[in-house]
Image: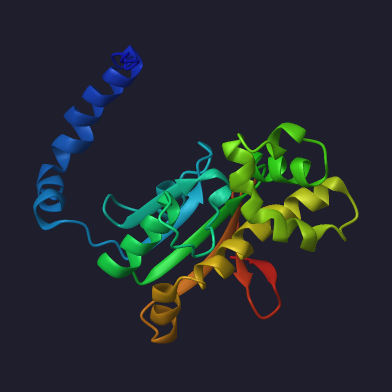
Amino acid sequence: MNAAKPLPSYLIQRYHGWKATTYSDNRAWYKRLATEGQRPRAMVISCCDSRVHVTSIFGADQGEFFIHRNIANLVPPYEPDGDHHGTSAAVEYAVTALKVAHIVVLGHSNCGGVQGCYDMCSGNAPHLEETSSFVGRWMDILRPGYDRVTASNTAEDHVRALEKESVIVSLENLMTFPFVASAVEDNSLTLHGLWTDIGEGGLEFFEPASRTFQAV
């Protein structure tokens, strides 16, 4: 059974608006992108959250960023076990084929995935513990981060700290990929951790020496 349906009318209208304005005004640029291929300078790993608008935050043009989005901007550890690994495949392609110079892991405030991980690890979301939960098994990646933030005073502090731990865990896991570690070692690739406050428009960067986030 084919469940696909025609696009909603508002999306069709927006497409025609884009084609008549943005595309029409930049037709040569789009043709160039199509014929010459992509040459992004950086890969950005961000959350699926619709409020996180990577290209707007950095004022990026089309073709500038290789963007991979998943729940809670997580990178799993290197596991070449023959299973399906969408995030790992994206990292491999970015580093070995596109030769990006930077990988940016971008976390954010009020992350539903991180909240789910906190609830699961604290025993308040048994449904996420089920083996059938895709979200729960994905958020297992962040369990080491949960163990590191439980010294905070309040649940709100725990969750905010865990949002930033999702960035740190991902940076640590990136270095388990041999081709990432090799590129970092020969200075052809740099890793960056960021966290953005959606409501305030703030941006913080991870400082490895102090394991803290500092305002940009």
Is residue 143 visible in the rendered structure shown here? Answer: yes
User: Image quarter for residue 168?
Assistant: bottom right
Q: Residue at x 62, y 54 (%)?
A: 141
Q: Position of residue 198 (x, y in %)?
A: 61, 44
Query: 165 left or right of 17?
Result: right
Q: Position of residue 72 (x, y in %)?
A: 58, 47
Residue that extends furthest to the bottom in the rendered view of this protein: 186
Residue that extends furthest to the right in the rendered view of this protein: 153
Is residue 98 visible in the rendered structure shown here? Answer: no
Query: 12 left or right of 187?
Result: left
Tally of marks: 0
- Quadrant where the C terminus is found in the figure: bottom right
Q: Which of these two is toward me, 60 or 66?
A: 66
Q: Residue at x 34, y 56 (%)?
A: 65
Q: Which of these two is toward me, 160 or 97?
A: 97
Please tell me whether residue 170 is drawn above or below residue 119 in the rendered image.
Answer: below
- Quadrant where the N terminus is found in the figure: top left
Q: Position of residue 82 (x, y in %)?
A: 40, 55
Please tell me whether residue 138 is drawn above or below residue 171 in the rendered image.
Answer: above
Q: Residue at x 76, y 35 (%)?
A: 125
Q: Position of residue 109 (x, y in %)?
A: 65, 47
Residue that extends furthest to the front in the rendered view of this protein: 81
Query: 98 left or right of 80?
Result: left
Q: Which color scheme does this rendered protein use? A: rainbow
Query: 115 left or right of 87?
Result: right
Q: Which of these two is toward me, 197 or 25?
A: 197
Q: Residue at x 23, y 62 (%)?
A: 39
